[in-house]
């Protein structure tokens, strides 16, 4: 996202200081600065994703639906591309503190303060979006508890597309992955790749293309959407559909702002979110299909991983799931309920 022309760190700091100062001044009058300024007009919704991203498209569709369904009584103003200067990891706290009424929050960026939000990133827990829907059924109540502790309400949740291993080699067994140097985006992916015998390197997205071009790594763990963005066909030949991890965006609203909306309109908004959420999931899955097709058209081959290999990957990474459940006791119940429903208990 380095090409979005975001404010410099000093600009962001200055804006946050101003926002916090405004919030403190408004507190004396009984309301956070931004919430008070927008109570009778629009509710800003902060997102770091650009206008063309399907999550931003979802947010704008939701905003249009809310305006129509409430006859203009509630308007949502989507601020895309980091326009409000908050970084992704700051969104949960920004909504909590009333610095912005709404935000589109990436769950995996909140695991430092709320480890339960890392469940989706556990390796090979869910093999498909159908399985992910079952996990969400058991997991969402725990996420809602986190939201409540942070003075907000979840309106809808939408996953990112499936993750792939994009490589120079075609892997048909776990042994084929041994010592392969691969770029990973976070610690969870690093631990997973280490467990299956690969040689992972934690590299930010902005440095990934250079690493592939120089040969520092010979693969990358990411979605097909990112594979298209990075023109992986210029460096790699295969992308393996292992669906090893997931993450989701949560659109939330500050509870002080939420309470200012009439009960009737709150129900309208909740009902609309529930109605649109399945279509938003479909948009995510379509983005995956479209991107996979573009990778194939550009000359890459999608590898359907054999079941014996999948079983081996799950076996080698199973201790990571057990360790996580021990460290995060609140995750044990939803994970066990999910595995039981999937008949994998």
Image (tube, rainbow, N blue to C red):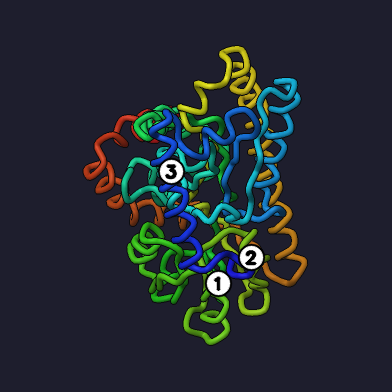
In the displayed image of the protein, which residue is found farthest to the bottom? 214
Marks 2,3: beta carbons within 8 A: no
x 52%, y 68%: residue: 8
**Can residue 144 be seen in this snapshot?**
yes
> x, y percentage for residue 247?
49, 47
x 60%, y 35%: residue: 43
Q: Where, by quadrant of the figure, is residue 60 drawn?
A: top right
147 displayed left or right of 319: right
> x, y percentage for residue 277?
63, 32
In the displayed image of the protein, which residue is found farthest to the top? 264
**Can residue 124 be seen in this snapshot?**
no
Mark in the foreground, 1 or 2: 2
Residue 248 vs residue 169, the one in the foreground: 248
Going from N to C along the chain, the mark reached first, 2 or 3, is 2
x 69%, y 58%: residue: 292
198 displayed left or right of 104: left
Instruction: Report crowding for label 1: few under 14, some 14 to 19, many 20 or more residues within 10 A (C-alpha).
Output: many
- Residue 167: give its label: 1
In space, the residues marked 1 and 2 are separated at their CA atoms by: 28 Å
Instruction: Report crowding for label 2: few under 14, some 14 to 19, many 20 or more residues within 10 A (C-alpha).
Output: few
> x, y percentage for residue 72?
73, 25
Mark in the foreground, 3 or 1: 3
Marks 1,2: beta carbons within 8 A: no
Residue 232 vs residue 116, the one in the foreground: 116
Instruction: Report crowding for label 3: few under 14, some 14 to 19, many 20 or more residues within 10 A (C-alpha).
Output: many
> x, y percentage for residue 180?
44, 75
Task: Note whether 317 is above or below 76 in the view shown.
Answer: below
- Residue 92: give its label: 3
Q: Which residue is mark 2?
A: 4
Going from N to C along the chain, the mark reached first, 1 or 2, is 2
């Amino acid at each position: 996202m380095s090409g979005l022309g975001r404010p410099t760190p000093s600009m962001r700091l200055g804006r946050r200081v101003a926002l916090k100062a405004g919030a403190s001044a408004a507190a004396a009058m009984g309301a956070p600065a931004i919430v008070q300024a927008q109570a009778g007009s629009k509710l800003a919704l902060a997102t770091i994703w650009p206008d063309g991203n399907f999550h931003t498209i979802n947010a704008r569709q939701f905003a249009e639906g809310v305006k129509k369904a409430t006859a203009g009584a509630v308007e949502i103003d989507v601020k895309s591309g980091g326009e409000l200067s908050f970084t992704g990891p700051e969104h949960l706290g920004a909504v909590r503190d009333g610095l912005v009424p709404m935000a589109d929050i990436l769950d995996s960026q909140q695991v430092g303060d709320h480890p339960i939000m890392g469940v989706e990133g556990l390796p090979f827990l869910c093999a498909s979006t159908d399985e992910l829907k079952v996990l969400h059924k058991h997991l969402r109540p725990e996420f809602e508890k986190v939201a409540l502790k942070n003075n907000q309400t979840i309106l809808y949740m939408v996953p990112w597309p499936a993750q792939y291993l994009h490589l120079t080699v075609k892997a048909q067994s776990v042994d084929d992955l041994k010592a392969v140097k691969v770029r990973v985006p976070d610690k969870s992916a690093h631990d997973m790749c280490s467990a299956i015998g690969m040689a992972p390197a934690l590299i930010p997205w902005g440095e990934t293309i250079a690493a592939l071009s120089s040969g520092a790594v010979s693969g990358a763990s990411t979605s097909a959407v990112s594979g298209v963005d990075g023109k992986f066909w210029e460096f790699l030949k295969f992308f393996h559909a292992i669906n090893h991890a997931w993450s989701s965006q949560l659109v939330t609203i500050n509870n002080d702002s939420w309470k200012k909306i009439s009960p009737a309109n709150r129900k309208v908004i909740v009902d609309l979110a529930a109605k649109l959420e399945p279509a938003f999931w479909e948009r995510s899955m379509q983005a995956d299909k479209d991107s996979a097709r573009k990778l194939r058209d550009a000359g890459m081959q999608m590898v359907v991983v054999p079941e014996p290999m999948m079983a081996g990957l799950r076996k080698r990474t199973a201790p990571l799931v057990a360790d996580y459940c021990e460290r995060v006791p609140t995750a044990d119940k939803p994970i066990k309920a999910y595995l039981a429903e999937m008949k994998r208990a």
